[in-house]
Image (cartoon, grey):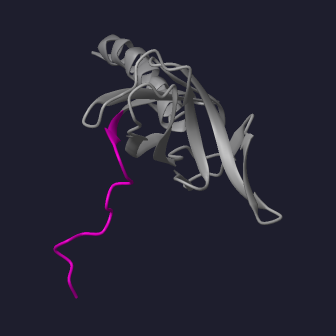
Amino acid sequence: MFWFMIDLRVPLLALLTVVGVNALAQTPELSGAWVRAMPPGQRMTAAYLQLRNLAADTITVVGVSSDIGMASLHETRLEGGRSSMHAVASLDIAAGEVVSMEPGGLHIMLMGLQTTPVEGDSVPVCVQTSEGDVCVDAKVQRAAPDTHNSHDHH
């Protein structure tokens, strides 16, 4: 009976080690993803989403991508009364932090589009991080989704 217990401990220890490593290296969670609908023929638009760091440590966003064209992380800044857009090479996100990509701020530029996404379509958007890649289907719509709960009138 003793040899049977030893034989079970080795695979069990290996399983617990794999589970433990996976718990430490968690990819972020993406939510609320949407892409701004544009008039036909436009070759550029933007994607917005919320990114939550589920890892125990700071992670770094090192890139973004999409099947519909080139993708790049950008930030809109107000400088001297003028709005300007700047590319963001990388983005550190602390453990447990949520970063919102929204109009007028941090966002994902989608450029060189082969076709213009139509309202109601879904567009794949991927975020590459130091902990791995995570993708989401972003819904194409004209304006930001209404995040207010219409049932909460009080």
- Residue farthest bottom in this picture: 154
- Residue farthest right in this picture: 80
Q: Which residue is at 30% across, 69% downward?
A: 148
- On whether residue 150 falls in the magenta region, the answer is yes
Could you say which quadrant of the image residue 139 lies in?
top left
- Residue farthest left in this picture: 151
Direction from residue 77 to residue 124 in the image, left or right: left
Q: Which residue is at 64% across, 36% downward?
A: 73
Total labels drawn = 0
Residue 59 shows up from this direction: no
Which secondary structure type mostly characterizes the magenta part of the structure?
A: loop
- On whether residue 140 falls in the magenta region, the answer is yes
Direction from residue 96 to residue 82 in the image, left or right: right
Can you say which quadrant of the picture contains the C terminus?
A: bottom left
Could you say which quadrant of the image residue 8 lies in?
top left
Picture layout, residue 14 above or below residue 61 = above
Picture layout, residue 129 above or below residue 5 = below
Q: Nearer the viewer, residue 68 or 148?
A: 68
Q: What span is colored magenta in the figure?
A: 138-154
